[in-house]
Image: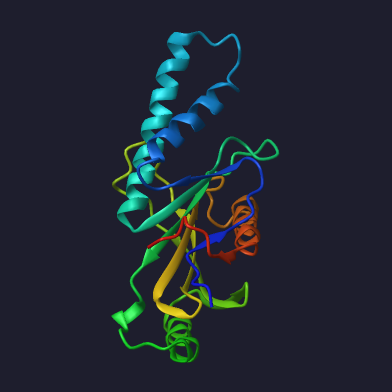
Amino acid sequence: MTRIQSYRVVLPPPWVRVPLGPEARDRVHDIVEQAAAQAPKEMPPDQLGPLKRELERRMLAQLAAAAERGGLDHYFPLGPMHGIHLGASFFVAAVTPPGGSAELTPDALAGGVLTELVASTPGATAVEIARTVWVRTEGVVAPDPDRTDGVDMPARRVTYLTAVPDDPQQWILVSFSTMGDGDPDSEHTLLTVDLFDAIMSTWRWATGADGWD
């Protein structure tokens, strides 16, 4: 069997993917230039320039935070979707198996660890995607005191956690966060969560060279 080393998801416009690694800075620069190209033509360069630099700074700070958590890729919408600003993003990370189970077998994984996580984690359910069982967890988190952008509101967070098929020593975490319209229980915010769940439903394992080893 060919070893799984990567994954694919289908992204609706205007969502974009930024691989976390040496090429991240160049990718961010390209994305900022794309966003700047959509600015009003009457905006003078002395206003547009500082906006571009601030956007690039914020994006790089987000990517650095995701990389510190084992992030592989970061995803976010490049502009509004159907005229609505989502205030959302998610990252994919390689994480340590729960409990550090060195002798874990695939059968024990399916029958034990994931079941225990669902039973012991508030807001957790078992979800099957691409013939793989994931632990999906959803909840509301308090404002992050370390944020430096002046945003002070709770966020709704959804995570998906599983082991790579036939390799239970490799685990993948997908972590989504949205502030929506500022109310974590509003229809707008919950529809944004539905959009993320729809993106996750397209997850497929792959064997490409751009893996997480």
> Residue 160: percent from the left, percent from the top?
50, 68
> Residue 206: percent from the left, percent from the top?
56, 64
Position of residue 38 relative to residue 213, above or below, is above
Q: Residue furthest front?
A: 1
Position of residue 44 relative to residue 174, above or below, is above
Q: Residue at x 41, y 33 (%)?
A: 26
Q: Is residue 167 left or right of residue 14?
A: left
Q: Residue at x 46, y 49 (%)?
A: 74
Position of residue 108 relative to residue 93, above or below, is below
* 169 and 63: which is toward the camera: 169
Q: Is residue 150 left or right of residue 76?
A: left
Q: Residue at x 42, y 80 (%)?
A: 168
* 134 and 143: which is toward the camera: 134
Q: Residue at x 45, y 36 (%)?
A: 27
Q: Is residue 108 left or right of residue 126?
A: left
Q: Is residue 83 left or right of residue 136?
A: right
The image quadrant where one finds the C terminus is bottom left
Q: Quadrant of residue 1?
A: bottom right
> Residue 64: percent from the left, percent from the top?
33, 45
**Picture mark count:** 0
Position of residue 12 relative to residue 102, above or below, is above
* 212 and 116: which is toward the camera: 212
**Tell me, what colour scheme is on the image?**
rainbow
